[in-house]
Amino acid sequence: MKYRNYRSPVSILILLLGLGDPAAIRAQEHDFQPVHWAYSSIFGTGWYQLDGNRSVFVLRMPPRQTLRRSSITDSGERKLGVEINYPVTVGLHSIDDLQEIISPDNFGTISFTPGVGLEIPVNKRWYLRPFANFGWGTEKDSDDSAWIYYAGIKSRYTFPGRKFDWFLLNGIYYAGYTPNSGRAESLAAAQLGVGFRRPLNNATLFGRALDLNWHVIYSFLGEEIDFGLPDGKFDPVKDQFEIGVAVSFRDQPYQFWFFKIDQLGLGYQFTPDGRFEAITFSMRSWFKK
């Protein structure tokens, strides 16, 4: 069975505010263990199962604060980039009506997982980006809560060209949660891919020069994750591909309130067997998000 994760207008509006990658997750019987709501801080926007037959729609809002930008001079003098992020993840019982969305009774789960990200210029072509987040979340209508953590490192190596640059992309991360009752869970993932960037001559947005970007990423999970389908069945996912295209600002991000917009992009995710598919929206490159 093939599953496509299409977005409603409300969902698209939410993603335009810079939320995260989508995932549709439902529980059927006890044959499978669905993704716990605590993982919503890592996976981002989607449907998550709570105890019993209740589920929530999760929004992830990731405001960030750049303390220092990374740089490297011709003489090899390096400056470490430092960024603090304050992701807040909220689970909603309903997204059908705007008044319901903002009603306190509509809130199902909430978590806050602040963290720090560094950008390390190894040389002018090679950058590393380690990150670590730790926080706590709770389910409003029960006593369930969990400590949540995730950390990893990403790598980007640039091969400059006359008309375009291309990148070798790599990453690993480890994530997990410890609930106030029950067993702690964790997972690990490794990622490998390539990216390209080409200047868009004479094209501007908000008065700024633009580049065209695209990437292909392969992700391998250390263990299968059971993503639920609309018909209540499960689709275990152990690895997936992502193809993305985006228009980015060449010089620096566009500041909108406390959101920093690096790019406007779409991604298409799918498993090798074609059974799981999703469409994502991003405002940061794969390396920086």
Image: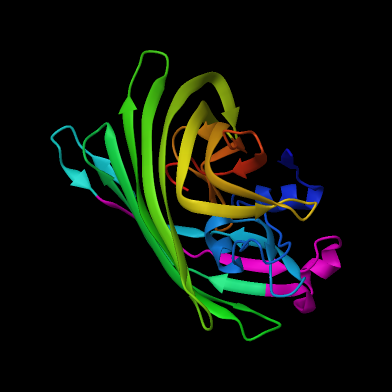
Q: Nearer the viewer, residue 232 or 95?
A: 232
One can see residue 243 in this view: yes
Foreground residue among 48 and 88: 48
Q: Quadrant of the N terminus?
A: top right
Rendering coords of residue 167 (x, y %) = 38, 28
Location of residue 137 with respect to 130 vertically, above or below: below
Q: What residue is rendered at 58% in x and 28% in y?
A: 204
Q: Is residue 6 magenta-colored? A: no
Residue at screen point 67% across, 67% down: 30
Relative to the observer, which residue lies in front, 97 or 63? 97
Give the side of residue 140 with respect to residue 38, left or right: right
User: Image quarter for residue 66?
Assistant: bottom left
Segment tinted magenta in the rendering: 80-108
Please report the residue visible at 68 percent of the width from the left and 68 percent of the height from the top: 91
Q: Is residue 67 visible?
A: no
Residue at the location (49% across, 76% down)? 183
Q: Give percent across and percent down for residue 191.
A: 42, 41
